[in-house]
Amino acid sequence: MHNGASPSRRAVLAAGAAAALAGCETYGGSAEEPPPPPPAGSAPAGTAPPPASSGGTAPLANLSDIPVGGGKIFEKQKVVVTQPREGAVKAFSTTCTHAGCDVTSVSRGTINCPCHGSKFKVADGTVADGPAPRPLPPVPITVDGNNIHLA
C-alpha cells in the first residue's frame, strides 16, 4: 500500500495541522509586523474626530420628524428613532432579535417586525410581544437642538 514514493495520509494530515497551528501563532500580529491601517474616514493619529453635533455630518433627522409616542425607521442606516414622550429620543437597531428580520413599522407605541409578529416598546426597545427573546439593541445618538445625529 505505502511504497515510500508519496507521503502517507498521516504525514499529510500532520503537515496540515502544523500549518494551521502556525497560522494561529501569528493571529493578532507580532512586533515585526506594522499595525493595520486605520479604518477609512478615521481621523489621523493625534487628532480628535469632530463631535457628532458639530455639523460634521448631516443630521439623521429633525426632532420634529419623529412623532411623540411613535418613531421613524431609517432603512439605509438600519436604525429606528423613537420619541416616547416629547423631547425624549431613543434609537435602536432595526434588526429583530428573533430571526434577524428588519422591523418595518412603528405604531401604537411599538416597533413591529413583520416576520413573526414581535413587537418592541418605543420607550426602551424591550419586548412587548414575542417571539423575540431580547430587546432591540440601542444605537447611540446625539441631539443638538432640533437635529438628531448618529453618535
Image (cartoon, rainbow, N blue to C red):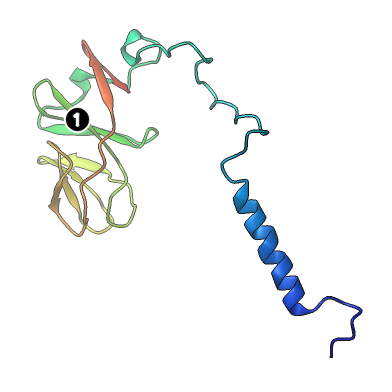
**Does 26 sit left or right of 98 as displayed?**
right
Residue 45's x, y, as percent? Answer: 52, 15
Residue 70's x, y, as percent? Answer: 14, 33
**Which quadrant of the figure contains the N terminus?**
bottom right
Q: Residue at x 33, y 17 (%)?
A: 59
Toward the left, the furthest residue is 85
Q: State how many labels appear.
A: 1
Q: Residue at x 53, y 15 (%)?
A: 44
Q: Residue at x 40, y 34 (%)?
A: 76
**Does 25 sit left or right of 49 as displayed?**
right
Location of residue 19 with respect to 46 vertically, above or below: below
Residue 105's x, y, as percent? Answer: 23, 42
Image quarter of residue 38: top right
Toward the bottom, the furthest residue is 1
Location of residue 103 with respect to 139 vertically, above or below: below
Q: Residue at x 87, y 77 (%)?
A: 6
Q: Nearer the viewer, residue 82 or 134?
A: 134
Image quarter of residue 66: top left
**Which quadrant of the figure contains the C terminus?**
top left
**Does 148 sit left or right of 45 as displayed?**
left
Q: Nearer the viewer, residue 82 or 23?
A: 23
Q: Amino acid at mark 1?
A: Lys
Residue 138's x, y, as percent? Answer: 25, 36
Q: Nearer the viewer, residue 99 or 67?
A: 99
Image quarter of residue 9: bottom right
Toward the right, the furthest residue is 5
The local crowd at label 1, few if under 14, some if 14 to 19, many if 20 or more residues have their Cα within 10 Å, is many
| Secondary-structure class at tag 1 | strand
Location of residue 55 with respect to 2 vertically, above or below: above
Q: Which residue is mark 1?
A: 90
